[in-house]
Amino acid sequence: MFEQSINIERVEQIVDLFGNFDSNVKIIENKYNVNITSHSGEIKVSGDAQKVNMAVNALNALIAIINSGEIITEQTVCSVVDMVNDGSYTSIDKLIDSDSICITSKGRPVKAKTLGQKKYIEAIKKNTVTIGVGPAGTGKTYLAVALAVAAFRAKTVNRIILTRPAVEAGEKLGFLPGDLQQKVDPYLRPLYDALFDMMGAENFSRCHERGDIEVAPLAYMRGRTLDDSFIILDEAQNTTKEQMKMFLTRLGFNSKIVVTGDVTQIDLPDGKKSGLKQAVAILKNIEGIETVKLTAKDVVRHRLVQDIIKAYEKEAERDEHKNQYYK
């Protein structure tokens, strides 16, 4: 049985580190099959030598996050464990030093929670067009909206434009009640939710009424030139090649475009190829355009979302291997 100790300067650090009912350290114990105890300002980790070293690295990274003033959550612990597993935990300082993008209506700072998210944010700041590809829960849309709100508040753009293709996933638009706007609103709801969180419902309503913020289906973009705007195309995997070209060519002067999507959740009819997949392939060598690929490691929802995504990825790999075998 191998054992390592970590000295703690303040009792409060142990309380924050262990979490309610020791929930944080239980995650680490289960991941590495080690035993973690605390006594008199000291944390002891015992078990297999290699696993103990990994657990200690995770605990030290979490202590560094606590010392920076961040609150440790279950998602934080899982992210740190992933960073330890792939050896990137030595870059934890990059996350700790990340500046907040903006402050939500409830006073909560929005900042990168994973290295992938940090790279995504930096790409959006640096480039005119950024394509963010990744699974659900990686913060693609939420972070893009946060950056759009920050640019709007700083007056570097005059408008925020958020759009989505209105592609049915099981239900037909014609079967939904109401006029055209009421029919498409359910497709745009995630965009409204993100804006409400950043700005508050009342402030958003005022900006929306003035035309400073526009949330509309992709079809409404045709024929327009969008100057001085921060434009976000969400669920871009459901655009056709023609729609993607139409959207990207709306770019005007002093504008920024962010395209987000998940290529594993394409709802296009059979025979239609995703415009997002084509855009990633043909725009990769153009200056001012960058594609950032987020993975299951960047998921910031419930820990089970990450496990679900990994399970589906493994199933997709098995299917691909099977198809190659029978060719």
Image: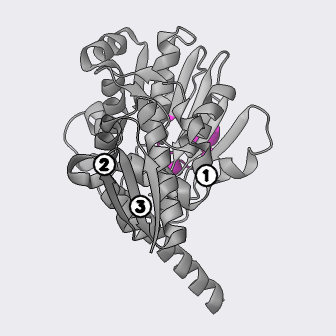
Q: Quadrant of residue 245?
A: top right
As measured in the structure, the alpha-carbon distance from the residue carrying label 2 to the one carrying label 3 is 13 Å
Q: Which residue is mark 1?
A: 88
Image side of residue 276 versus residue 106, left or right: right
Q: Earlier in the sequence, mark 1 or mark 3?
A: 3
Query: Disc 1 vs disc 3: which is toward the camera?
Result: 3
As measured in the structure, the alpha-carbon distance from the residue carrying label 1 to the one carrying label 3 is 21 Å
Residue type marked 3? Val
Image side of residue 17 versus residue 227, left or right: left
Residue type marked 1? Ser
Q: Secondary structure at mark 2?
A: helix
Residue 241 lies in the magenta stretch: yes
Q: Which residue is mark 2?
A: 18
Residue 140: which numbered mark, if any? none
Query: Disc 2 vs disc 3: which is toward the camera?
Result: 3
Q: At which x and y percent is residue 172?
A: 30, 52
Residue 45: which numbered mark, if any? 3
Q: At which x and y percent is residue 187?
A: 34, 41
Residue at horizontal 40 percent and vertical 33 percent from the top? 70
Q: At which x and y percent is residue 81?
A: 47, 56
Span highlighted in magenta in the image: 233-246
As measured in the structure, the alpha-carbon distance from the residue carrying label 2 to the one carrying label 1 is 23 Å
Residue at horizontal 41 percent and vertical 61 percent from the top? 45
Q: Earlier in the sequence, mark 2 or mark 3?
A: 2
Query: Disc 2 vs disc 1: which is toward the camera?
Result: 2
Q: Compare residues 41 and 62 and report the one nearer the observer.
A: 41
Q: Secondary structure at mark 1?
A: helix
Discs 2, 3 touching: Cβ within 8 Å:
no
Residue 82 lies in the magenta stretch: no
Residue furthest out toward the bottom: 326
Looking at the image, residue 186 lies above or below residue 125:
below
